[in-house]
Image (cartoon, rainbow, N blue to C red):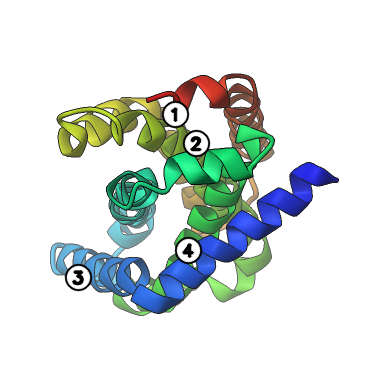
């Protein structure tokens, strides 16, 4: 119960910080829409190439958006010298990771929700008839990106070359998530949509493993 209360308090802090600045959401939405629009010029929206390559480009855009969100995740605490105060106020370091994970996942899902209609129109791919299944894939994939990215952001925020270290560690780590998410999305956007439970199960296992790793090693990741 104490863990949930601390997590809720820290999550509320993350939301208030973003609502005051509106830096992450605004910048990420503009960036991801620009990427999707630029990619759309290389495809004929009436051809089957949109269904074949659209899911991969979609998840690449989500990865770029997540990188923008994860970079200041712990860096903001370092610059304002508030991480030590947050650690003293939190009896469990895992609550810090849970709050930041929940905030990052919510921001990424909000960006995906706003961007999905743009993708459907530009790539001429209907998504509304598979929206419930697609929402499950988007949530599982986004959670996988954020749970691994939040841990890597805690490490890179304390490094000297933090801007380079985050993508250097994050991109190879997230390759399985991107492959599974792309395959599951492609199956849903195919001519005969099907929910690939094997890929969804893989994403769920990835999320569980990295969430457990954050619980076990979270205190060490926050060490300066």
Q: Disc 2, disc 4: CB below 8 Å?
A: no
Location of mark 2 (residue) = 180
Q: Disc 2, disc 1: CB below 8 Å?
A: yes
Q: Is residue 51 above or below residue 214?
A: below
Distance between mark 1 and mark 3 Cα atoms: 25 Å
Q: Is residue 31 visible?
A: yes
Q: Position of residue 30 (x, y in %)?
A: 25, 73
As helix, strand or loop, the secondary structure at mark 1 comes to helix
Distance between mark 2 and mark 4 Cα atoms: 21 Å
Q: Is residue 6 above or below residue 117?
A: above
Q: Is residue 174 above or below residue 127?
A: above
Q: Disc 1, disc 3: CB below 8 Å?
A: no
As helix, strand or loop, the secondary structure at mark 2 comes to helix
Q: Which mark is residue 107?
A: 4
3 or 4: tag closer to the N-terminus: 3
Distance between mark 2 and mark 3 Cα atoms: 24 Å
Location of mark 1 (residue) = 176
Q: Position of residue 128 (x, y in %)?
A: 58, 75
2 or 3: tag closer to the N-terminus: 3
Q: Residue at x 67, y 34 (%)?
A: 92
Q: Which mark is residue 59?
A: none
Camera-nearest residue between 114 and 220: 220
Within 10 Å of disc 2 (Cα), the crowding (few <14, some 14-19, many 20+) is: many
Location of mark 3 (residue) = 34
């Amino acid at each position: 119960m104490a863990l949930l209360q601390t997590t809720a308090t820290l999550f509320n802090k993350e939301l208030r910080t973003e609502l005051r600045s509106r830096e992450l959401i605004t910048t990420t939405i503009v960036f991801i829409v620009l990427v999707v629009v630029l990619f759309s010029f290389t495809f004929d929206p009436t051809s089957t190439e949109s269904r074949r390559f659209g899911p991969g480009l979609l998840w690449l855009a989500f990865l770029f958006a997540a990188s923008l969100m994860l970079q200041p995740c712990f860096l903001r605490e370092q610059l304002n010298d508030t991480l030590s105060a947050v650690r003293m106020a939190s009896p469990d370091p895992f609550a810090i990771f849970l709050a930041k994970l929940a905030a990052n996942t919510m921001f990424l899902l909000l960006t995906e929700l706003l961007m999905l209609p743009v993708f459907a129109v530009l790539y001429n791919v209907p998504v509304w008839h598979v929206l419930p299944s697609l929402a499950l894939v988007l949530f599982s994939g986004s959670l996988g990106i954020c749970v691994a990215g939040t841990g890597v952001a805690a490490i890179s925020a304390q490094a000297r070359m933090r801007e380079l270290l985050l993508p250097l560690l994050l991109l190879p780590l997230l390759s399985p998530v991107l492959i599974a998410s792309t395959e599951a999305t492609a199956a849903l956007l195919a001519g005969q949509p099907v929910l690939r439970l094997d890929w969804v199960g893989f994403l769920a296992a990835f999320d569980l493993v990295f969430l457990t790793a954050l619980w076990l090693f979270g205190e060490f990741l926050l060490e300066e």
